[in-house]
Image (tube, grey):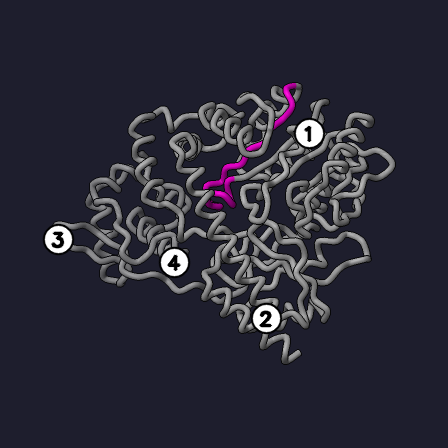
Amino acid sequence: MRSPLLQLFQHQASGGVRERLCATLRLAIGRRHLHAGQQLPSSRQLAQDLSLSRVTVEAAYGQLESEGYLRRETGRGTFVAITMPATSSPPARLASARFSARGELLLATGGCQDPPFPHAFAAGSPELRAFPHETWRRLSGNVQRSLGSAAMGYGDPCGYLPLRSAIADYLALSRGVACQPEQVIILTSSQQALQLLAMMFVDPGDEVWMEEPGYPGARSALLAAGARLRGIAVDAEGAVPAAGSAKLMYLTPSHHYPTGVTLSLPRRLAWLEWAQRNRSWLIEDDYDSEFHYDERPIPALQGVDRHQRVITLGTFSKSLFPSLRLAWMVVPPALITPVGRARSVLDGHSALLPQAITAAFMQQGHFASHLRLMRQLYRSRRDLLLAQISQRLTPWLTPLASAGGLQLTVSVQQNEARLTAQAAQHGLLLPRLSPLYAGPDRQQGWILGFAALTPDEIVAGCDKLERLLRES
């Protein structure tokens, strides 16, 4: 195997061989590619890698030791002695990049920033401190031993079949989803699923509908594909059926993001009829259906779809942990082959080992047990936050529907943007509600995450919020 220093060495054109090697090592240390304490190859190994004599390498190592760059220890080897400080000079100005129209639309969305954890009141974070880490570690070892080198190769673009089967069984029992394992496509995230669907179905200028207010990740994916978005009003029964047609309609029917309302059965039937009549697709984002607290959740929209017009999305980021990077998409039978082929072009496949561990976690009953525990935990934390708002923050905040989820949406009577900026100066995150509206009629408020916060952290966050509101 060639040394990673080879390219740098070959670009040192002036001086003798020893001087060139010294310059190469100084450059690698100066650019912070090599850090203090890092061990260098033995003189014999480096001489072989660079096709030099060992005497030359020894001489270079000795020279750099005398200059303070290296430290040599008898019987142990040669180590970098210093880490160079970062340069304070500004980077060279590059010519401005020119992007495609789609690239410009993508950049205009502002990107996605995951919340820090745990931090009051960052939204969307699950509780990771209560995760069954020991069980996951044990399963990881068992799966690795069982699969061996098979876990290290390329996988099926549609996903690891045992995981697809476990998801199909879980969705049938918990969400009323009617599907075969072959209809389940494994992806890295629900955002990737949205981007894939936008790429497959949307041409620039096509009209696409989504709820207003709505999930910004869906808006970003659709706008980047060149869609013309139409916001569909949401009331106490969910998205209001509208006249007209569109290629796609994006819905969060189980727990609307961000208001929390559930799409009523008459509305569900109306949207399914609209999709069949217009040959449109309904994208059902079932993003936190595992966490309903006050009543049994209504089954998924897909389960009552007689015309195969619903594509259902979900993710393990909230039910397990975000860095797992696994999500799923249930597609109608007619879409299995084309979506699987497109997924192979877009991203090849999801990592096989995490899929296999997750499959074992589900098959052995740990997933169901973990969800039961988290539902109890999150419900108690939601109740605590609601009590804190009722007792201390009611003059300023009004909670919206809160039957489930990892966050609680509240309306605020004062200037949302100003208060949010002031809160950030005091270490308090208040994710804003108004940017989730595309139109001019915007409700002011915050989306307060509670799931990742202990009771003490929730109370401390409310202490800060109360002081902020009283002083404003």
Left of 1 or right of it: where is 469?
Answer: right
Query: Mark 3 and mark 4 in contact (Cβ < 8 Å)?
Result: no
Residue matched to label 2:
391
Left of 248 or right of it: where is 178?
Answer: left
Q: Quadrant of the N terminus?
A: top left
Crowding at mark 4 (Cα within 10 Å: few <14, some 14-19, many 20+): some
Q: Position of residue 467 (x, y in %)?
A: 58, 77
Residue matched to label 4:
30
Real-space CA distance between mark 1 and mark 2, rounded to the nearest whole angstrom: 43 Å
Whether the magenta-drawn stretch holds residue 207 is answered as no
Q: Amino acid at mark 3?
A: Thr
Q: Amino acid at mark 4?
A: Gly
Residue matched to label 1:
310
Left of 62 or right of it: where is 260?
Answer: right
Look at 69% across and 27% down and name the residue there: 305
Say which label, 3 or 2, has the lower sequence index: 3
Real-space CA distance between mark 1 and mark 4, rounded to the nearest whole angstrom: 56 Å
Q: Amino acid at mark 1?
A: Val
What is the secondary structure assignment of the residue under circle 3?
Answer: loop
- Based on the displayed image, in which of its 4 quarters is residue 426 positioned? bottom right
What is the span of residues highlighted in magenta in the rendered image? Answer: 316-333
Q: Which label is found at residue 74?
A: 3
